[in-house]
Image (cartoon, grey):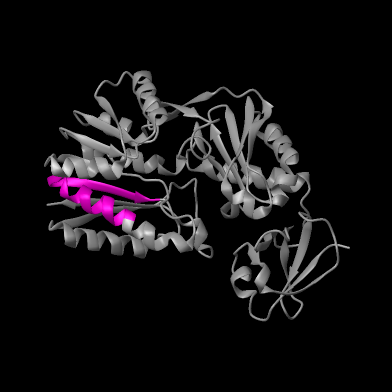
Amino acid sequence: MCYKIYLKKGEEKRIVAGHSWVYANEVARIEGKDKNGSLASVYAHDGRFIGKGYINHASKILVRIFIRGDGVDDKDYYLSALSSANAYRQRLGYENCYRMVFAEADNLPALIVDKYGDYLVIQCLSLGIDLRKKLICDCLVELFHPNGIYERSDVAVRKKEGLAEIKGLLYGEVPDYCEIVENGLKMLVDVKNGQKTGYFLDQKENRFAVRKYCAGADEVLDCFCNSGGFSLNASTVAKKVIACDISPLALKNVEDNAKLNGIENITTLQGDVFEVLRSFRREKRQFDTVILDPPAFCKTADEVKDAYRGYKDINLTAMKIVKSGGFLITCSCSHYMTMPLFEKMLIEAARESGRRVRSVEVKTQAPDHPSLLCAEETQYLKFFVLQVE
C-alpha cells in the first residue's frame, strides 16, 4: 500500500499555492507502507488531496511534490516534463548552452540538467530522483540525442538525503572540457571538475550586461573570476582586465579561454580576494570598474551573519578602489542573503565608504533559471550595478 501523508491543520496553504516541499514537522500522520524514495500521496488535514511526490524519511523534506493530479511517474511523465522544460528555453532563444531543467521551477524537484553544446550534465539531489536516474537518462537520450551525459552529483546537499556524493559518466562519451559559445565568445567548460556542473550559466545575460559598464575602461578588476566569464566579456570593450581568483586552475581556465578567443588584454592574478582588495586600497590603486562575483558565503541560515560581514567587507573595500564615476558590479548567489538584506548591506557599505553611490541596474538570474513566486528558495541571484562618485 502506498504511503499516504496527512498534514497538520493549516500546513497545506504553502503547498497548495505551488511550493513542492513537505517538511517532516508539518505532518500529522502517515498511513500505508512502501519503499523509501517511492511515490507518496499527500493530503490536507481534512482529507483533501494535494499531490504526489517522492518520500524520504532520512530528510527533513519528507516529500517533494511534483504531481498535482492523478498522474504517475512513468516514462511518459518524464518525457513530457523534460520536453516541456526544454521547449521553454528554446522559445527564449537558448540554443548552445543553458539550464535545461531547473528542479522545482520545472516541476522536477531536485533535478538539474545543464546543456553544454552536444553534452548534458545532470545533478540528482534527492533519493527519489537518484533512484530514477537511468529512466531520466533514457528519456534525455530519446529526446535530445546528446553525445554524452555526465553526472555531477558531488554536492554536500545529498548528505541530507542520506546519499553519497558521486560523479561520473552516465551515457556516451564526455570530454574533460566541452566547448560552448556564450555571448559570441568561445568558452571551455570543465564539466568533470569545475564548480557546480562546470560553469555558472545563471550569469549569462549579466556577463553580457557588464560590457556597457566596462566600455572604454583603462582597467577592469574581475574578482572571483572563476573561468573568466565576466573577464572575457569585459575584455571585448576595455583596454585591460585583471582576472583575480585564489584557484590556480581557475586562472589557467581564464588563460585558456582568452587564448581560444585570441584575447590578449587579460592578466591573471592569484590571491585571496579579501587580501588583494585591501592591498590595492593600501597602494591607492583604483579601477574604472570592479566586478565581485563571489561563491555563496552562506549555505545555511545560521551562516547569514558571518556572510553579511564578508559581503560588506569586500564591497566596502571595492567601493574605495573604484575611480570617481566608475562602476562596482556586485553579486550574491546565496538565497539566504535575500535581496532586501543584500541591498541593506550595500547601503551600509556605501555610507561607510565615504563615497556617493548610485544604483544603476539591478538584475537576477538568467531566464533559463526561472523562479517560483511561491518558493523563495528558487530566487537566489542578486546582481547590482553601482556607480561610485
- In depth, the one of 14 and 331 nearer the eye is 331
In this picture, residue 154 sits left or right of residue 95: right
Q: Does residue 41 appear in the picture of this structure?
A: yes
Is 355 a magenta residue?
no
Q: Quadrant of residue 243?
A: top left
Q: Does residue 110 appear in the picture of this structure?
A: no
| Magenta highlight range | 310-332
Q: Is residue 303 above or below residue 194?
A: below
Residue at 21% x, 45% y: name it: 278
**Residue 263 image position (x, y, % from top left):** 29, 21
Number of numbered discs: 0
**Residue 185 image position (x, y, % from top left):** 38, 27
Residue at 76% x, 51% y: name it: 73
Q: Is residue 40 above or below residue 235?
A: below
In this picture, residue 235 sits left or right of residue 246: left
- In depth, the one of 250 and 4 nearer the eye is 250
In this picture, residue 78 sits left or right of residue 344: right
Screen quadrant of the N terminus: bottom right
Q: Residue furthest right?
A: 1
Q: Quadrant of residue 253?
A: top left
Is 323 a magenta residue?
yes
Residue at 27% x, 50% y: name it: 314
Q: In this view, does 307 lie above or below 29?
A: above
